[in-house]
Amino acid sequence: MHLHHARSLLFLPASNVRAIDKARGLPCDMVILDLEDAVAEENKPAARAALAPALGQGFGGRLVAVRVNAVDSPHHSADIAALAGLTPGFVVLPKVEAAAQAAQVHRATGRPVIAMIESPRGVVEAQAIAAEVGVAALFMGNNDLRHDLRIPLDADRSGLMLGLQSVILAARLSDKAVFDGVYNKLDDAPGFTAECHEGRALGFDGKTLIHPNQIEPANTIFGPSERELADARALIAAHTGGAERHQGAMIEDMHVAQARSLLERAGQA
């Protein structure tokens, strides 16, 4: 699968062998073995040691990433050392605030980097970070960004909108993939669904997840619906060149390109 087509990207503590085994049967598009937030301080060495067997066994056709600790963390250098000789598809780097940080990790690991944008500085630097040759995609870190912006815990996402849209804009300027942040309320399915719909409407490719229950709704919402696919096929078939009327709207070459892109994402090009 191409990274741009990923819909559901599941974080798993690298130290949780049972969860990792279970993930091999889950319909997520990416598995992210986490050495950072999901792993308690005393479990960091065990999490690093678990990487080699987990990656060695593979995850079928799923994309695979490892999230290391941030460059200013005391755990960062040990995480990078633990990746020597291992070949995850991507390295997720949290709290990126400068393109040079991502470039450094790309050089050290030889892997494409997914940069997490989690702070005001990260948002402001997002265009330079996305333009970095070793960066494959951007993740939103909405919890940290909320904290830094002093948005109340129970507030909606309206205060995050400039940040979210700035990061999407940065990603698209460099033709990189971009993914929405995690949703914390595990038993609020309607809230999760609503946030997925909002994320897709903003232009995110998919969503980072923290629970297997979130996979199916993310796949459904970030994947094109049957109706969208049928409409795309009809639009392509109807187009004869230039601007013309189709189902009560004006269409042109750009709309055809968009329809083809939708079919390609669904593997139906």
Image (spheres, rainbow, N blue to C red):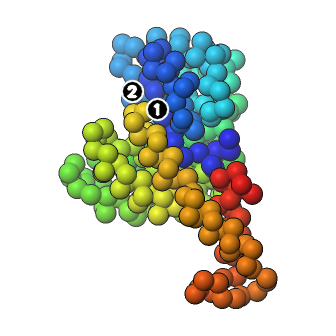
- The residue that label 2 is drawn on is 38
The residue positioned 70% from the left and 51% from the top of the image is 267
Query: 55 or 243, which is in the foreground?
Result: 243
**Quadrant where the image shows the C terminus:** bottom right
Q: Is residue 105 visible?
A: no
Give the amino acid at mark 2. Ala
The residue positioned 36% from the left and 18% from the top of the image is 41
Image coords of residue 221 (percent x, y): 48, 53
Q: Are marks 2 and 1 in contact (CB under 8 Å)?
A: yes
Residue 257, label in figure: none
The residue positioned 60% from the left and 51% from the top of the image is 177
**Quadrant where the image shows the N terminus:** top right
Choose the circle earlier in sequence order: 2 or 1.
1
Asked if 85 appears above or below 195 in the picture, the reply is above
Mark 2 element type: loop
Give the amino acid at mark 1. Phe
The residue positioned 64% from the left and 44% from the top of the image is 3
Decide if residue 127 is on the left or right side of residue 234. left
- The residue that label 1 is drawn on is 11
Image coords of residue 166 (percent x, y): 48, 62
Image coords of residue 109 (percent x, y): 66, 28
